[in-house]
Amino acid sequence: MDLLKPYDDTYFMKRALMEAEIAFEKDEIPIGAVVVVKNQIIARAHNLTETLNDVTAHAEMQAITAAANYLGGKYLKDCTLYVTIEPCQMCAGALYWSQIDKVVYGARDEQRGCINMNTKLHPKTKMSGGVMKEEASELLKKFFIEKRNMN
């Protein structure tokens, strides 16, 4: 029986989900992200669109900025972004320009995600999904059910 590597996709997606929980507690849409290089988390982020009153303050955008600041440059080569939901068109565009190596997402965003929008990532960027998708989906559903019940 194979033992799980301590630092696999599930390990890092759990960290992204912890960020999504923080967003949930702040009454933000619960999406979280972490950027990893050589099995080290160099950036943690979650949605801040309500807090900052900024439509561009998505978890991925916050994570890209934090990682670039950490690295001291705008390119995220050799980095992997773990995000709880498939990136939207705006975030995919920013990821394109960052030249990130890999994007791993939890759940698909069938309506606004970059896949259905046909947004291209950098040719060298690999993308995979479905890591802890049930947990990511459930948190979003819980958030929107609570929002509807408050209105």
Image (spheres, rainbow, N blue to C red):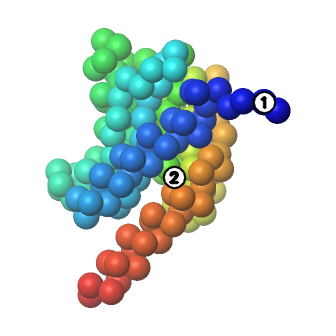
Q: Callout 1: helix, strand or loop?
A: loop
Residue type for callout 2: Ile
Residue at (30% x, 54% y) in the render: 23
Tell me where residue 74 appears, x and y as whole percent: 37, 18
- Image quadrant where one finds the C terminus: bottom left
Q: Is 15 on the left-hand or right-hand side of 148?
A: right
Residue 43 x %, y % = 35, 29
Q: Residue furthest right?
A: 1
The structure residue drawn at horizontal position 33% and vertical position 40%, both measured from the top left corner, is: 45
Q: Which residue is mark 1?
A: 2
Give the CA separation, mark 2 to mark 1.
28 Å
Toward the viewer: 132 or 59? 132
Quarter location, residue 123: top right
Is the residue 61 above or below the residue 111 in the image? above
Q: Residues within 10 Å of mark 1 (few under 14, many from 20)?
A: few
Disc 2 is placed on an element classified as strand
**Residue 85 image position (x, y, % from top left):** 51, 52
Labels 2 and 1 touching (C-beta < 8 A): no
Q: Check the picture and name the quadrant holding the N terminus.
A: top right
- List the residue tagged with mark 2: 85
Given residues 76 and 36, the one toward you in this image is: 36
Q: Quadrant of residue 75?
A: top left
Given the image, on which type of amino acid does mark 1 rest?
Asp
Q: Is residue 14 left or right of residue 30?
A: right
Identify which residue, 6 or 40, lies in the foreground.
6
Q: Is residue 92 visible?
A: no
Side of 16 relative to 111 (left or right) = left
Residue at 17%, 51% in the rendered image? 52
Mark 2 or 1 closer to N-term? 1
